[in-house]
Amino acid sequence: MIIKRTDIGPQLSRMVEYRDMVYLCGVTADDKSAPAKRQTEQILAKIDKLLLQAGTDKTKLLTAVIYLADIRECEMVFESWKNWVDPQNPPARATVQATLATPDTRVEIMVTACKREG
């Protein structure tokens, strides 16, 4: 069985594929000066691109964890999430407040998806 690792850095791989599973590391926005809602939109666009690269899409998400620097920003984040997620195929999701890697990172999202159903 081959494990495919994408964008390998000194401490992590951006994406790992194994069999029909795709694991994304915590994805953050490129524009850290943006508010939480805009950071979320940037992150979700990056997730779309990474999933497409792996041969899957958001309809096959299994789990998602949303990390927020400030839980009081959850409604803004959830608005972007709701507009993006497939309502027929929502993943199991958790949302937690956490101290993120940099002070200007407001949101980080980690997802797991499969490549095909069945």
Image: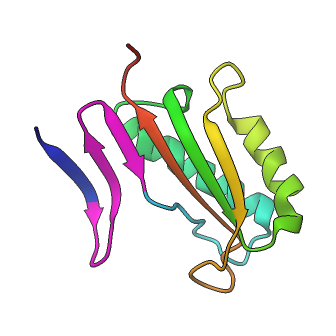
**The C terminus appears in which quarter of the rendering?**
top left
Residue 9 vs residue 64, the one in the foreground = 64
Rendered residue at 23%/33% (across/down)? 19
Q: In this view, does 64 lie to the left or right of 11?
A: right
Please determine whether, in this image, residue 73 is positioned above or below residue 56.
below
Stretch of the chain drawn in magenta: 7-24
Residue 68 vs residue 76, the one in the foreground = 68
Residue 24 locus on image (x, y percent): 43, 52
Residue 63 locus on image (x, y percent): 55, 40
- Outermost residue toward the bottom? 103
Q: What secondary structure predominates along the stretch shown in magenta?
A: strand
Q: In this view, does 64 lie to the left or right of 88?
A: left
Residue 22 locus on image (x, y percent): 36, 41
Q: Is residue 48 left or right of residue 44?
A: left
- Outermost residue toward the left? 1
Asked whether residue 20 is drawn in magenta, I would say: yes
Quarter occupied by residue 30: bottom right
Asked whether residue 65 is drawn in magenta, I would say: no
**The N terminus appears in which quarter of the rendering?**
top left
Residue 112 locus on image (x, y percent): 46, 42
Please determine whether, in this image, residue 2 is positioned above or below residue 35.
above
